[in-house]
Amino acid sequence: MACADCIGQNGGGRGYIFVMRLRDRLFLLPCLLACAFLARPVLADSGDVEGSHDYPGWTHMPGFEITDYDEDNPSVFTFAVSRPLPIDANHLEAIPVEGHRFVIRYEWAGSGAAPSLLKSQRFYEKLAAAAGYTVEKSGAVGNVTETFHLDKDGRQVWVFLNPGVRVNVLTIMESRAATSQTLAAATSALPPSLPAALSTPPPAPAPVPAPQSPVVPPPAPTPSPTPDAAEDPIGTALISDGRVVLPLTFLPGKPDMDAASQPVIDRVVAILKLHPELSLTIEGHTDLTGDEDYNLTLSKERAQTVRNLLIAGHIRSKRLVATGLGGTQPVADEGTAVGREKNRRIELVVRKSPTKQEAPPKEVTQDVPASPPVEPAGNSSPSFHAPAPDGVNYYPAPATAPPPSSSGSRPSR
């Protein structure tokens, strides 16, 4: 006899019903827990910086933690896109995108050796494919960065991956722009009650007869001129304050400068040519996020990049010294994204040449007529007189003195 039957017989069926209800509740509890676990929001790991989180579709790589997280809106970032040409299969084109920017830095925090660079690339490529992104630039030898693009319902998302062995940086830009899909959707949404004339193109206008006098084309627009070196604020700050922060932009976690910052380098070259007496120290600074040694190396490499670009502009190398200070000299609060961005900077500092030691002033002496030189013995000059027997030297008489007597004796002095 089954246990349930015993319970039913002894309790008139009430014990059986109680056991069945208890079984159903015990089975429902783990289901509820599993649903709550699967429906939980994406939260940062315990080692992530406060306020950080993964971007939807781009999760943590196992063993990595978020060590820096920034959001800027609006912002502009230039993405590298492959544009193969018949003569150059590795040609890259820079496309600036404006919108809401996310910069997420992942750093290895696991035990043992970090995953290889290729494994990091494969991990993010799988995430991109699963979320429906297209690859606009794939990683290659010498330039392992990758660009992914998602265009859906007028919403564009660009992702720039800068992979490494221990550090992976994602720069994500959200923007809304009109695309062919949105235009097609807008056209198909027209109500059918509209006249057919609205859906047909208007007739071409009648040709206008050419005027008798030739038409002078309007002058071509001139590009906005670069500030005059004599009035450039960068040069003014260098002369007055002895230092200035350059408005440069570097790729996240890389010493490579963004192409949009090249005009700033050109302005500095013009200033240094106008002031050949200036010698500069190029200081690289980072924030305090991440490894201290890595930041020191990165700041040195970025300062060296600026120095190389100035030398390429025909500035003598001995006028430029590059140094990296890492995060040792912050100028803003490290607790905010704005403060950390201000701390990541390149400063130009005027190097003062050592002062030359002045020679002591010469003594001013009055012109005193020199006394007649004493001629050595044996001189046949008629002005020389041999010593007297008493050992006293006798000198020629002054020009005003009377001529000596015929006896040949001279008065003693």
Image (cartoon, rainbow, N blue to C red):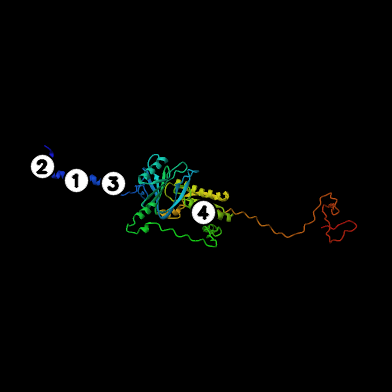
Mark 2 or 3, nearer chain start = 2
Give coordinates of residue 243: x percent, y percent: 52, 56
Please state which amino acid type lies under the numbered disc 1: Arg
Do the CB atoms of the residues marked 2 and 3 lie less than 8 Å apart? no
Please state which amino acid type lies under the numbered disc 2: Gly
At 49% from the left edge and 55% from the top edge, which residue is drawn? 245
Please state which amino acid type lies under the numbered disc 3: Leu
Mark 3 or 1, nearer chain start = 1
Circle 3 residue: 38
Do the CB atoms of the residues marked 3 and 1 lie less than 8 Å apart? no
- Cα distance, mark 3 to mark 4? 50 Å
Give coordinates of residue 397: x percent, y percent: 84, 58
- Cα distance, mark 1 to mark 4? 70 Å
Circle 1 residue: 25
Which numbered circle lies on residue 8? 2
Give coordinates of residue 202: x percent, y percent: 41, 58
Instruction: Decide: few, some or many residues near mark 3? Use Cα within 10 Å; few <14, some 14-19, many ≥20.
Output: few
Please state which amino acid type lies under the numbered disc 4: Pro
Which span is picked out in magenta? Answer: 262-266
Mark 1 or 2, nearer chain start = 2
Q: Secondary structure at mark 1?
A: helix
Q: Looking at the picture, does residue 181 appear above or below residue 89?
A: below
